[in-house]
Amino acid sequence: MYSAIIKRIAIRNFQRVNAGDYEAVLAGCTPDIHHRFGGHHTIGGERHDIDALRAWFQRLGRVAPDLTLTIRDIWVKGGPWNTHIIIRWDNAETLPDGSRFVNHGVHVVQMKWGKVVDIDANEDSQAVAESMPIRAAHGIDEALAAPIES
């Protein structure tokens, strides 16, 4: 039963990210959330608090407004005191030049007592990095900004 509830929460949070409803996702996180998104590019790096993660989500919405994450699999392990969720996903979006961008990855999420304490996002970071100059060439200057890290 607990595993099914956590799976529904993960699905709902991915839907919220697709819709740009980042505040709803952040409401389920601890103030000292740790977030890592692989790669050396504008959305790469590590954050260690909710304010930095909020700024990261806002940037994600600006640089990838057509982001569409599709969950492929979810695994849940542990109890409410220490839950690990593994989410395998695909991403497809249209870049500003009209080309298709596809990626896939895995999030490893840790929750404690109903709150997310750690998000480790692993994807094809090279593909993400290579998409940023295309985004910047079409007016999304922030696509080449330094990562938001705290």
Image (spheres, rainbow, N blue to C red):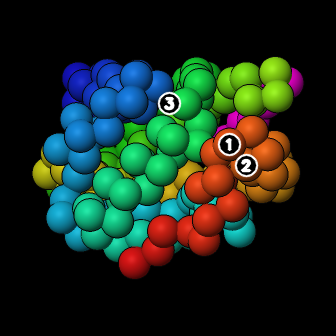
Using the rendered view, name the quadrant where residue 147 is placed: bottom right
Q: Amino acid at mark 2?
A: Ala
Q: Position of residue 2 (x, y in %)?
A: 23, 30
Question: Which residue is more in the foreground, 78 or 21?
Answer: 21
Q: Which residues are magenta?
A: 99-106
Callouts 2 and 1 close, C-beta under 8 Å:
yes
Q: Earlier in the sequence, mark 2 or mark 3?
A: 3
Using the rendered view, name the quadrant where residue 73 is placed: top right
Separation of marks 2 and 1 at Cα, in angstroms: 5 Å
Q: Amino acid at mark 1?
A: Gly
- Residue 149 lies, with reference to residue 17, above or below; the image says below
Callouts 2 and 3 close, C-beta under 8 Å:
no
Separation of marks 1 and 3 at Cα, in angstroms: 36 Å
- Residue at far front of view: 139
Residue under label 3: 74
Q: Nearer the viewer, mark 2 or mark 3?
A: 2
Callouts 1 and 3 close, C-beta under 8 Å:
no
Residue under label 2: 136
Residue under label 1: 139
- Is residue 3 among what the camera can see? no
Q: Residue at x 40, y 47 (%)?
A: 58
Q: In screen coordinates, is 118 left or right of 99? A: left
Regarding mark 2 in the picture, which secondary structure is present there? Answer: helix
Using the rendered view, name the quadrant where residue 24 is placed: top left
**Residue 22 within the magenta-colored segment of the rendering:** no
